[in-house]
Amino acid sequence: MTYILNIETATTNCSVSLSKDGETLVLKEDSSPDYSHAETLHLYIQDVVEQAGLKLRDLKAIAVSKGPGSYTGLRIGVSAAKGLCFSLGIPLISVSTLKSLACQVHVEEGFIVPMLDARRMEVYASVFDFKHEEVREIRAEILNENSYSEFLTQQKVYFVGNGVEKTQRLIKHPNAIFIEGKLPSAKEMSPLAYEKHKKNDIEDVAYFDPYYLKDFIALKPKS
């Protein structure tokens, strides 16, 4: 039996799951907008392990959402995952934030565009087919009314994530379907992390860094 702890902190959703052989046993998350990750993440980790009736020593690996997403959120999640891997002597697995978000959409045809809000009219996004295979790489892109037209002219396109709100203000194509209220979750990480574990697709704990996609820009506090 392979027990994996999954950590998702790339957005406002502080999400932790514990899985057995790729199936989520326990999930705990809070998507409140105040970014309470630093205060709640370790409590959630403790809670899901206890609810599963396990000890930390029972874990075979730690999986973490690698980005893109919030700089601070990713740092908190990766730091916690690395600390656990070092202390327990188990491998670190990284899971694409956008792929796990795309896996929330289950359709029989068309494309899936998981997108996370960036600054102004920009999003972090990639494109997957209905089998959750990536057909276009991750990009930081500025939206306009013609965005994703090469996919919209072919089939229905399902947009998901917290970048949907500003996207639907611009894109009016009849093939565009907008799924609101969704954020990346540790629940969808479970099967993805398990598949990587079976292939021994792991990270170097000492040198792994989140996938920020863009350089961090510190904003001045409002006066």
Image (tube, rainbow, N blue to C red):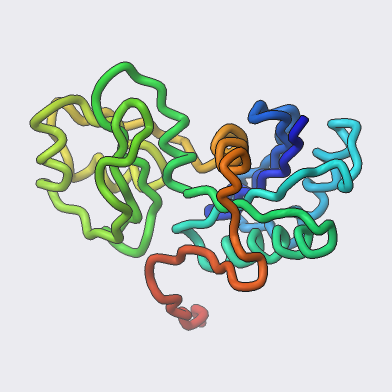
Please tell me which residue is depicted at 60% across the width and 47% down the height of the picture.
200
Please tell me which residue is depicted at 80% across the width and 43% down the height of the picture.
59
Query: Left or right: 69 with respect to 61?
Result: left
Answer whether residue 73 is visible to the viewer in this image: no
- Considering depth in this image, is 159 or 221 the residue closer to the camera? 159
Q: How many tags in the picture?
A: 0
Query: Left or right: 54 with respect to 128?
Result: right
Please tell me which residue is depicted at 25% across the width and 59% down the height of the picture.
141
Query: Left or right: 211 with respect to 51?
Result: left
| Residue 218 x %, y % | 47, 80
| Residue 3 x %, y % | 76, 36
Q: Quadrant of residue 108?
A: top left
| Residue 25 x %, y % | 74, 27
Which residue appears farthest toward the top when viewing the image?
Answer: 108
Q: Quadrant of residue 53?
A: top right
| Residue 137 x %, y % | 29, 51
Answer whether residue 46 is visible to the viewer in this image: yes
Q: Quadrant of residue 77?
A: bottom right
Work out which quarter of the rendered image holds the N terminus and state it: top right
- Considering depth in this image, is 16 or 210 the residue closer to the camera? 210
Please tell me which residue is depicted at 68% across the width and 57% down the height of the picture.
37
